[in-house]
Image (cartoon, helix red, strand yellow):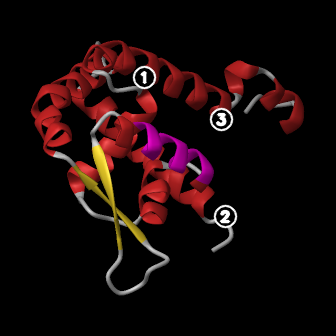
Amino acid sequence: MGTNMHPVAFYAETSNSIGYLTRMAFRAFTRSLERRTLPYGVTAGQWRFLRALWAEDGVTQRELSRRAGLNEPAAVAAINGMEKKGLVRREQSRTDRRRVHIHLTQKARALEPQLLPHVAAVNELAVRDMSPERVALLRELLAQVTRNLADDLPE
């Protein structure tokens, strides 16, 4: 932070705001990736759900919304759209009728090897001209920021 600048004034400048810079980077990632996934019929919002389900299929709708980083109403809308496209199916829990599990369809599974190279390409583009050490530091710092802010959230 600037030597004599008050923190409010310092962070009011968007070039100094970690939150603003992170949001702009996220938006750039999203636009770049969506440009590559839309030809497959997958939006950026749906991409997050696919990634989570490729890692672990059959999680509950609530857990899937948490992993995708969306609130439940937004997650329901995204899952509805994915269901209409034939990417997922809902299954009521056998042990707790209030829980709904989300499962990938064969169509969605077939997209994984087609789409994962695109995320690699976008990440490589994002860190172009950075040394491996700087990329490792960036990952470490972003993970620390995430942990720090997680401490501020209620359980």
Are there few (<14), some (14-19), or many (20+) residues within 10 Å of tag 3? few
Tell me: residue 78, above or below residue 20: below
**Residue where numbered disc 3 is placed:** 19
- Label 2 residue SS: loop
- Start and end of the magenta stretch? 73-81
Q: What whole-number distance in Å separates the C-alpha atoms at marks 3 and 2? A: 16 Å
The residue under label 2 is which amino acid type?
Leu
Q: Earlier in the sequence, mark 1 or mark 3?
A: 3
| Res. 138 in view | no
Quarter in which the C terminus is drawn: bottom right
Tag shown at residue 29? 1
Horizontal placement of 85 versus 8: left or right?
left
**Residue where numbered disc 2 is placed:** 153
Are there few (<14), some (14-19), or many (20+) residues within 10 Å of tag 1? some
The residue under label 1 is which amino acid type?
Phe
Quarter in which the N terminus is drawn: top right
Provide residue 85's location: percent of width, then percent of height. Answer: 33, 33
Q: Residue at x 26, y 27 (%)?
A: 119
Tell me: residue 93, above or below residue 20: below
